Image: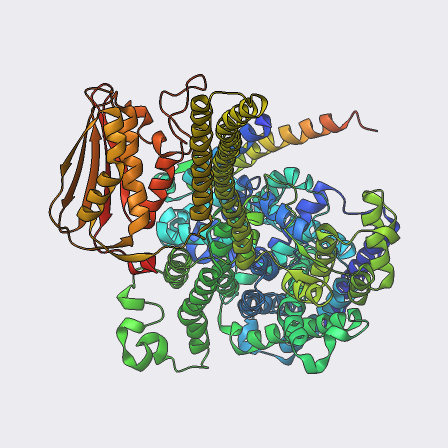
Amino acid sequence: MPEDLRRRDRLVGLFLLALVLLNPPILWLFGRGSALFGLPLLYVYLLAAWLAVIAAVAWIAEGRAMRRRRDEEPRP
Amino acid sequence: MAGWFIILVAAIYIGLLFGIAYYGDKRADQGRSLIDSSFVYALSIAVYCTSWTFYGSVGRATQSGFDFLPIYLGPTLVFCLGWLLLRKILRVSKANRITTIADFIGSRYGKNAALAGLVAVIAVIGVVPYIALQLKAVSISFTVLLNYPAIGVGPLEGASSAFQDTAFWAAVCLAAFAILFGTRHIEASEHHQGLVAAIAFESIVKLVAFLAAGLFVVFALFGGFGDLFQRAAADPELKRLLSFEATGGGFSWIALTLLAMAAIICLPRQFQVIVVENLDERHLDRALWLFPLYLFLINIFVLPIALAGGLLAPAGVDPDTLVLTLPLAGDAPSLALLVFIGGFSAATGMVIVETVALSTMVSNDLVMPLLLRWRRLGLAERPDVAPFLLGIRRLAIPVLLFLGYLYMRLVGERYALVAIGLISFAAVAQFFPAIVFGLFWRRATTPAAFAAIGGGFLVWAYTLLLPSLARSGWLPVEFVDQGPFAIADLKPYALFGLNELDPITHSLFWSMLVNVGALVGVSLLTTQSALERTQAALFVKSLEQAEAGRLWRGTAQLSDLKELVARFLGAERADDAFRDYARRRRLDVAKLAVDGELVRHAERLLAGAIGTASARVMIATVAEEEPLGIDEVMRILDETSQVIEYSRRLEEKSGELQAATAELRAANERLKELDRLKDDFVSTVSHELRTPLTSIRSFSEILHDNPELPPEKRDEFLGIIVKESERLTRLINEVLDLSKIQSGTLDWHMADVDLAELARDAAAATSQLFRDKGVRLDLALPDKTPALWADRDRLMQVTVNLLSNAVKFCPNAKGRVTLAVVSDPDAITLSVGDNGPGIAAEHHAAVFERFHQVGVTLTEKPQGTGLGLAISRMIVDHHGGRIWVESELGRGATFRVRVPRKLALAKAV
């Protein structure tokens, strides 16, 4: 099933992206103690990046779940 | 706050849990599952968030800022890979009825019971501190509430009897709950639906409680996030926490992320809820983002609460209790009570699932394999093992809780919550390489898994467990500070002088170096058995193939199988299982064929109850399995090569047959030829006999019918009759001779013969012939030749025959025949040459055959009997000599007879 394979590859790609986004070299950049709208930049960045990753997972995984349900609907 | 009131609230909460668990089990029994939803599944996975998260994270954040976060980022990363990793683990585990992490590893590496046992031991040792952490959290939170309205009275310094008792009684309550809902019955599937329902409920409670505390702190105690962060930024100590530097540098962050990635899979309770309690693989799809979202939500307020604690909390407050003390400080005791219940639910959820998972592991992978192998106990023969199995688990749960309590009392009091938890994480992380490599690398071998897990565990124990004991006073503290025997290179927190890393990162680095190194290195150096290879393929290829039926060759009785399964699952469940199996295949349950699939099904049923390694042992007691071992494979190969060998031999044989056929055909041809020759012979002989007989008869009739013939005529006729009679006699003699020589009955009169003299005699005997025809005979004979051992008369016959032939074929007037004898050291050669018409080359061999008369047709009068040369050849052959002719057409012919001087003795006799 090429559709599933594509989603799998997307998730793997997302994993690699998240690995980079949520680990030191990038975190050093955001972790210098500066602030954004009065909020610590690192705090905002971490939560935002984390939420973005979760949203991306949801987008990919739910697409699959929807497709599954659609596939199963015709069955009684 | 009154102690009884707190206890009452906690008791009501526990009662509620009992109720939910009971209802969940009841619904499951009715077949209307309460937990068959991806939301409940995701919530049950959130058992990952324990007191560590609830209380410990804030405590950690007050020390090192964002450092608490990697523990939740790691699982998020793993769930990104959920499709690849988790789904694979799910598939494999469901297909093989794997119920614990020990089972999983043991099964992957050749169903090795010893390996599963090792994993179980490490899991118990590693997780005990983690259980201690929960008990400690329960007791400190209880103490904080108890001391209200006083805030900041250090519970640790007090070490009151209440503190000790809370932990103890909490442990007792939790043990009761775990036993009730975690070991209700032995089931092949090992689903505990009531338990999972309760856990999911607890996850909601702790999230709600924590979010409530967070909202209260941020929006009631402060004027929102901006206000809080601005005030924190004003404090240089708190400002430090907001930078990445506070986390202790990049290595620590990465190490913690890795630890958490490993833990989300390797922790026994996580394996239990993610894999074992999973009802439907499709639930994973939504859990992939729901669970990380849960982690996200529960972590939003950790840092704000920690900062608020730094700003507001009175001195002496244990940072691990800030979630609780801040509402109290804000005069919101009811919220504090909710928070307490939230923390309590976090602790109880973890302890319950963890002890159930561990008890399954201990009973299936540690105790049962030992007991089953202990023959004197006769366990393998007992009719009903299920109660015994449950007994082990029910015993294991309190023992585990007691160990946790003991660790807390002996060691844990001196450690912060997260520090204790990380020790556990680092222990179970030792399983991670074996699992991941096991799932994706087929060649990872059993010895390698032993070396990896064992080696990693030893390094972990040396670099984390022993120092924790030393710091608690159970080992000399010099062990940590100066290294054992004051060897600085062996300091457990700075092995080989590596003191740049914090203890957790340091331990993780060395243990993983050993672990992964051993796994890869030993795998490359060892080979797999047939079973290992089958299992490895089963795990690595689990996503490609739904179910790989293992090759199974053996025999078993259906009744034996059923009885065996019934002994572990109970008769009713066993019956159900077999009926289901039969129904799925549309077969009659009584007529099930005991094939590999059924045996495997039974093994899986058992594996659900007692673990794969033990199940294999049990199945082996009723099923005479002949595993497809290397011997078997070799035999199959042998058979194949034998077939090849046979076919090769067959080819050979057929070749031989062809050759034999060809020989036979040749022989047949030869026989036919001989037959033809015989016919020819007979007809020729008849013909030869009839010719003289006819003349004799006709002349006799003439004489008889004409008595008045003139006497000269009568004499002439009588002469013809006599001559023809002689010829007849000669012919008959020759035929007799021929048959005598051929049958070997001819008498040979051997004596010393002088061939020259013999030749002279022959010439004398035939001189009349030569004179009659006017042919000249030249003799070239030595006076004397060396003596030959021969039959003189027969050689004479040969010579005379050759001479008379020569005369016959010579032209009348100019005929010329030469008779010569030449002797050389080996042999004596006699030759007769003529100047007749000669013999064509193709007839050179044929002239020596019987009745072969060159150039003679039946129309001409035969010039001889046609037997002379044939007889001559036989005679010469008998003397070991050779006779041949040299001739060309029109240039005469020379017959030569060469007789060796030294006749072989055998021939002479």
Please say whether residue B307 is visible from this viewpoint: no
Residue B529 visible, this angle: yes
Q: Residue at x 27, y 74 (%)?
A: B488
Where does the N terminus of chain B fall, quadrant-wise? Answer: bottom right
Front in this rendered view, residue B798 or B540? B798
The vertical placement of B253 against B402, above or below, is above
Q: Is residue B107 left or right of residue B386?
A: left
Q: Position of residue B325 (x, y in %)?
A: 59, 60
Q: Please report the residue visible at 32 percent of the width from the left and 67 percent of the height from the top.
A: B494
Residue B395, position as x, y percentages in the image: 71, 75
The foreground one among B819 and B590 is: B819
Q: Is residue B889 above or below residue B657?
A: above
- Residue B40 lies in what quarter of the image? top right
Q: Residue furthest left?
A: B783
Q: Position of residue B620 (x, y in %)?
A: 68, 65
Quarter the C terminus of chain B occupies: bottom left
Judge left or right: residue B812 versus residue B36.
Answer: left
Q: Quadrant of residue B358?
A: bottom right
